[in-house]
Image: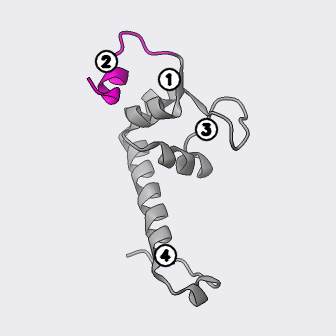
Amino acid sequence: MDKREAILNRRSQPARLNSAEAATLLGVCEAELAILANKKILSPLGSPSQNATKWWAREDIESIAESRPLLEKITRTLYSYRRTRNFRATKPESENSAVTQPQAA
């Protein structure tokens, strides 16, 4: 049994989830949780410092995972982030100083 199955098949879920567990329940990678937290779509418990372990409320993560509109918002946010990041990566370095946002299609 892999890590994902072990998390999803627990008999009782803990109230606090670490980033790996929260990401598994949402179907995203751990790095994308930071993007979503930065965009204020998700919020970790407490007020952790930037390099601290982030804990997420199971109740919040499960409610988001069951809400289609919120999942669509997460997906759009991640697509937009990747599109902007890839746009910046493909421009020559001299043009990166005055980066403009790509136009939405």
- Secondary element under disc 4, as helix, strand or loop, is helix
Amino acid type of the residue tagged 2 in the rendering? Asn
> Of label 3 and label 1, which has the lower sequence position?
3
Nearer to me, 36 or 49: 49
The answer to whether residue 80 is above or below residue 74 is: below
Please state if 49 lies on the left or on the right of 100 as rendered. Answer: right
Q: Position of residue 97 (x, y in %)?
A: 64, 83
Amino acid type of the residue tagged 4 in the rendering? Ala
Q: Which residue is mark 1?
A: 59
Q: Please give the count of numbered marks on the rendered protein.
A: 4
> Cα distance, mark 1 to mark 2?
17 Å
- Secondary element under disc 1, as helix, strand or loop, is helix
> Cα distance, mark 4 to mark 3?
28 Å
- Secondary element under disc 2, as helix, strand or loop, is loop
Q: Position of residue 29 (x, y in %)?
A: 42, 44
> Of label 4 and label 1, which has the lower sequence position?
1
Task: Give the magenta part as a residue range.
Answer: 1-14
Query: How crowded is the residue under tag 1: few (<14 C-alpha within 10 Å), some, or many (20+)?
Result: some
Residue at 49%, 75% in the rendered image? 89
Pointers 3 and 1 in contact (C-beta within 8 Å): no
The answer to whether residue 82 is above or below residue 102 is: above
Nearer to me, 66 or 90: 90
Q: Residue furthest bottom?
A: 94
Q: Which residue is mark 4?
A: 89
- Secondary element under disc 3, as helix, strand or loop, is loop
Q: Position of residue 63 (x, y in %)?
A: 44, 29
The label shown at residue 9 is: 2
> Cα distance, mark 4 to mark 1?
37 Å
> Of label 4 and label 3, which has the lower sequence position?
3
The label shown at residue 43 is: 3
Q: Position of residue 77 (x, y in %)?
A: 47, 56
